[in-house]
Amino acid sequence: MGLFSKLFGKAVEDAAESMFGDEKHYFDNLREDDAPQPVSQKSSPNPPPPKKGEVVRGNLPWGPLMPKEENQYSFGGSYIEYFDKVFREEFPDFGITHAQVEGRYHPATVFTFTNISGRIVLIVELMSEKSNVKKLAYKCRNEGTPYLRFYYDHQGWWNARSYVANRVRGALSV
C-alpha cells in the first residue's frame, strides 16, 4: 500500500483493511503445520503388460490406440455399413437414406435424415480427409439445414460409436 497511502493517505489503507482484514488475519495466523498437505494419489495397481500378440486398446475415440468401444475399424464391414448401422440403431425415429456422390478426386457418401413429415433435418457427409470439397456444406448452410462431416480415413481418429452418436444427437438437438 505504499504508493496508495502516499497518494491518498490513510483512508485507502483503512478501507482495504475493512474489506480484506479477515482474510489477512487468517493468513497471518496460519501456521506451517496447518498448511494443507498434498493428497496421496493411491491409484489402482498398474495393469499387467500385454501378452505377446495381444491387441492393446485405449478408452479415447482418437489417438494411437484403438478404443475398446465399437468403432469404424473394429466393425466387421465397410465404413458406410458402420455409419449406416450406428445411425439406424441410435436414431430409429428418423428416416435415413444414403447415396454416393462422385467428387472431383474422391467420392463421398451423403446420409440424409428426415423426420416423420419427410422434411430433411440433417445431412451427414462421409468423405476422405484428402478431399476439400465444401459445396454441400455451403448449400446446407444457405438452406438452413444442419450439416455434419466425418472423415473415414483420418489417421488416429476412430469414429467411435459414442462420438458419432453424440455429434449427430447434438446436430439434431435430440
Image (spheres, rainbow, N blue to C red):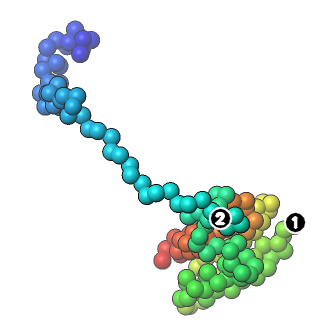
Label ID, residue 105: 1
Q: Indicate the secondary structure of the residue bearing disc 1.
A: loop
Using the rendered view, name the quadrant where residue 89 is placed.
Answer: bottom right
Residue at the image point whose x is 60% and y is 59% from the top? 49
- The answer to whether one can see residue 115 in this image is no
Q: In this view, does 58 lie to the left or right of 134?
A: left
> Earlier along the polypeptide chain: callout 1 or callout 2?
2
- The answer to whether one can see residue 155 in this image is yes
Identify the amino acid type marked 1: Tyr
Q: Give the residue number, with chain letter if any, for mark 2.
A: 51
Q: How far apart are marks 1 and 2 (CA)?
A: 43 Å
Residue at the image point whose x is 16% and y is 18% from the top? 13
- Image quadrant occupied by the N terminus: top left
Residue at the image point whose x is 75% and y is 65% from the top? 153
| Residue 58 image point, x, y percent | 59, 63
Q: Indicate the secondary structure of the residue bearing disc 2.
A: loop
Identify the amino acid type marked 2: Lys
| Residue 83 image point, x, y percent | 67, 78
Residue at the image point whose x is 53% and y is 60% from the top? 47
Which residue is outermost to the top? 6
Density class for disc 1 (Cα within 10 Å; few <14, some 14-19, many ≥20) is: few
Q: Could you say which is closer to the camera, residue 146 or residue 73?
A: 73
Q: Could you say which is closer to the camera, residue 158 or residue 168?
A: 158
Q: Could you say which is closer to the camera, residue 82 or residue 117?
A: 82
